[in-house]
Image: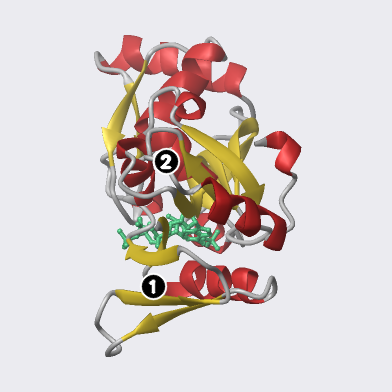
Amino acid sequence: MIKLGVPSKGRLMEKTFEWFGNRGITLKRSGSEREYAGAVEGAEGVSLVLLSAGEIPRELAAGRIHLGVTGSDLVREKLADWDSQVTSLAPMGFGYADLIIAVPDCWADVDCLEDLDAVAHRFRATHGFRLRIATKYHRLVRDFLTRQGVADWQLVDSQGATEGTIANLTAEAIADITSSGETLRANHLKILSDGLIHQSQATLFAARAADWTGQQGDFAVLVHQLGLDAAKL
Ligand SMILES: Nc1ncnc2c1ncn2[C@@H]1O[C@H](COP(=O)(O)OP(=O)(O)OP(=O)(O)O)[C@@H](O)[C@H]1O
Ligand SMILES: O=P(O)(O)OC[C@H]1O[C@H](OP(=O)(O)OP(=O)(O)O)[C@H](O)[C@@H]1O
């Protein structure tokens, strides 16, 4: 069987079911409301595995699932050298979110990364420690700031309510995803003009490490059914 990993709850799950449904494949949760079992109708040799969106990158990398739907941000964050481990088969047109760097609105002289670099330098000289950026996207933020030549910062881990860390005095800046911008506005934060790290959306990925032996026939049919460009595979 081709194992397809799909987010187990919320809008990502609903939109994923809709995306496959529009292509003639019915995915559904089977069993009770709280049971994480799934069923597939309309595609031969495909089984459904319901997983946390955040765990799907690791399951793909380990080859425990052949295909998986999750945010492109999560794959880049959780997998070192992600494109050597998975192939991106199709952006799915939902689950849009931007990973950005934001600072307090009241930092009138900080609008871009160059300003942040200058402030971070002064901050370290004044306070004796590096300016703190709260995030759960450690790999993506570290790589981005290093590439952009910003120095004198440190990352502090925040697994949720990240925009609140500044008011709580545990960070000076944040890096988090935003979609409507409401949370940033409510917490009096502004995005740096060149602070966009990644534009994420739900994406269908294939695992390079999965055992594809004997799955090629069913996979070829699935690729056709989903309208994927076979030449890209
Ligand atoms: N407004 C939003 N808030 C949170 N995540 C969003 C939003 N818009 C899109 N996303 C995307 O949804 C994905 C995160 O989904 P979700 O929070 O269900 O994952 P998770 O961290 O595995 O959750 P859990 O561990 O609670 O199961 C990310 O790829 C993220 O970019
Ligand atoms: O731009 P917006 O539409 O306001 O959305 C962005 C917010 O949504 C996410 O939080 P989530 O609700 O997943 O909770 P979290 O604090 O646990 O990350 C994200 O971490 C932001 O806080």
Residue 179, given in percent of the width and then of the height, sits at 59, 58
Q: Residue furthest bottom?
A: 32
Colour mapping:
secondary structure
Which is nearer the eye, 54 or 45? 45
On whether ligand 1 comes within 8 Å of the CB at mark 1, the answer is yes
Residue under label 1: 9
At 43% from the left and 74% from the top, the residue drawn is 10
Q: Is residue 126 above or below residue 94?
A: above
State the residue at coordinates (51%, 28%): 83
Please give left or right for residue 148 compared with residue 163 in the image: right
The residue lying toward the viewer, choosing from 29 and 137, is: 29
- Assess disc 1: are there few (<14), some (14-19) or many (≥20) residues with their C-alpha within 10 Å of its C-alpha: some
Q: Is residue 3 visible?
A: yes
Q: Does residue 58 lie above or below 17 as drawn?
A: above
Quadrant assignment for the N terminus: bottom left
Mark found first going from the N terminus, 2 or 1 = 1
Q: Nearer the viewer, residue 54 or 193?
A: 54
Q: Which mark is residue 213?
A: 2
At mark 2, the secondary structure is loop
The quarter of the rendering in which ligand 1 is drawn is bottom left
Quarter of the picture holding the C terminus: top right
Say whether marks 2 and 1 touch (CB < 8 Å). Answer: no
Q: Residues within 10 Å of mark 2 (few under 14, many from 20)?
A: few
Report if residue 172 is visible in the image: no
